[in-house]
Image (spheres, helix red, strand yellow):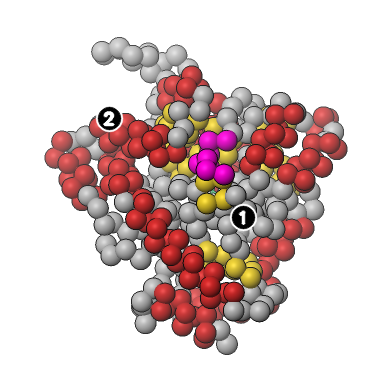
Amino acid sequence: MFDDILTFIRELYREPEAFIPLHAPVFTGREKEYLCECIDSTFVSSVGQYVGRMEDMITDFTGAAKAVAVVNGTCGLTAALHLAGVEPETLVITQGLTFVATANAISHTGARPVFIDSDADTLGMSPDALRTFLENHDPADGRVSACVPVHIVGHSCRIREICALCAEYGIPVVEDAAEGIGSYFEGQHLGTFGLLGVLSFNGNKTITTGGGGMIITNDEELGIRTRHLTATAKTPHRWEFKHDAIGWNYRMPNINAALGCAQMEKLDDILADKKAVAQAYRAFFAEHADITYIDAPKGCDSNYWLNTALFASKEQRDAFLAESNDKDVMTRPMWTLMSDMDIYQNALSDSLSTARDITDRAINLPSGPRLES
Ligand SMILES: Cc1ncc(COP(=O)(O)O)c(C=O)c1O
């Protein structure tokens, strides 16, 4: 039924028969050399030259004043929320259409997530829906202590409007830019608009450290505190173990950072190929009357982490999901809305009507770079 789409994807990936993953990492640079260097030097854990080097590469690349390497994006979000001043029993606003890690990070601070609708073009938090919530919010439901907009599939949400609105209400913004390395809004890297931003380097992301993440901020002091708290809050001394706060052991190990440095060296090549893949999907779906390619929104230079298409109906989308996966072309729906899961069924939420329409009809297509490993 969908032979034309599946044939197109197989040609795009020059893969006539074998399984095509949604997004596999490519190791075309000095990954093995750097990993061997870690092993030969014995510095495989939380001390070693690659962690600082990776942080410097990220500040250079994103323009953020400070970058702190952590074990993964989820821990990065939890720490960032704490550093933004989130306290137990407060409310943290995020969007209903996101990966569960966003909501879980909020829950791990002891705060309660609030789920806001998305915009159809960005897939991210709708500033209009956010304003409606803030204007009608009853303080008896809890104080709002932070807002976490999410940049979905590499496309930016309306981040300037969201930051301006939050500033009006005195609410700090922590950007979930887990999917956003290499994406910009009006020339500024995602994750650098709010007080803090968080990137992920999970194996399915644009570049990977195996598992890993990065907290970025333009507030130098806050960056120094982030570094301190995510590395057990140890006070400097040659041998004494004294800690001046209850910190976390969230520091990215050197062995993961080694992989990350090699990946960063190839990021431009990876982004160039991902943009070529996106251009091919854009042209292909332009000829398809009932399937809409969700392109980067206005002002956004996207990394096209995943390419997303919107089918005419949920039934048609489900049929394509079944057929593509049966035929070894990996595709995935968007996430189940947070408020539709038992774990978050009692959370505050607006109607999520746009988010529901997206999650019912959208599909994520194979999007990995085609560089030879
Ligand atoms: C939107 C979003 N937020 C948070 C995360 C969590 O990142 P990690 O897997 O590195 O913990 C991910 C990805 O996995 C994500 O896609």
Q: Are marks 1 and 2 in contact (CB under 8 Å)?
A: no
Residue 152 covered by magenta stretch: no
Q: In this view, does 349 lie to the left or right of 150?
A: right
State the residue position of label 2: 47
Q: Looking at the image, which residue is at 37% across and 14% down?
A: 235
Q: Report the span colored magenta.
A: 186-193
Per the image, label 2 sits on a secondary structure element best described as loop
**Front residue (pair 362, 144):** 362
Above/below status of 287 relative to 71: below
Q: Which amino acid does label 1 sit on?
A: Pro
> Going from the N terminus, do you reach mark 1 or mark 2 first?
2
Q: Looking at the image, which residue is at 69% across and 40% down?
A: 161
Instruction: Give the main secondary structure, helix, strand or loop, of the magenta stretch.
Output: loop
**Front residue (pair 334, 272):** 272
Labels 1, 2: front one? 1
Q: Position of residue 177 (x, y in %)?
A: 53, 44
- Few, some or many residues within 10 Å of mark 2 (<14, 14–19, 20+): some
Above/below status of 112 relative to 15: above
Q: Tell me, yes or no, if residue 229 can be seen here.
A: no
Q: Position of residue 1 (x, y in %)?
A: 57, 87
Q: What residue type is labelled 2?
A: Val
Q: Does the residue labelled 1 lie within 8 Å of ligand 1?
A: no
State the residue position of label 1: 297
Per the image, label 1 sits on a secondary structure element best described as loop
Q: Looking at the image, which residue is at 72% across and 60% down?
A: 356
Q: Where is residue 272 in the image (x, y as percent from the top left)?
A: 40, 58
Above/below status of 109 relative to 3: above
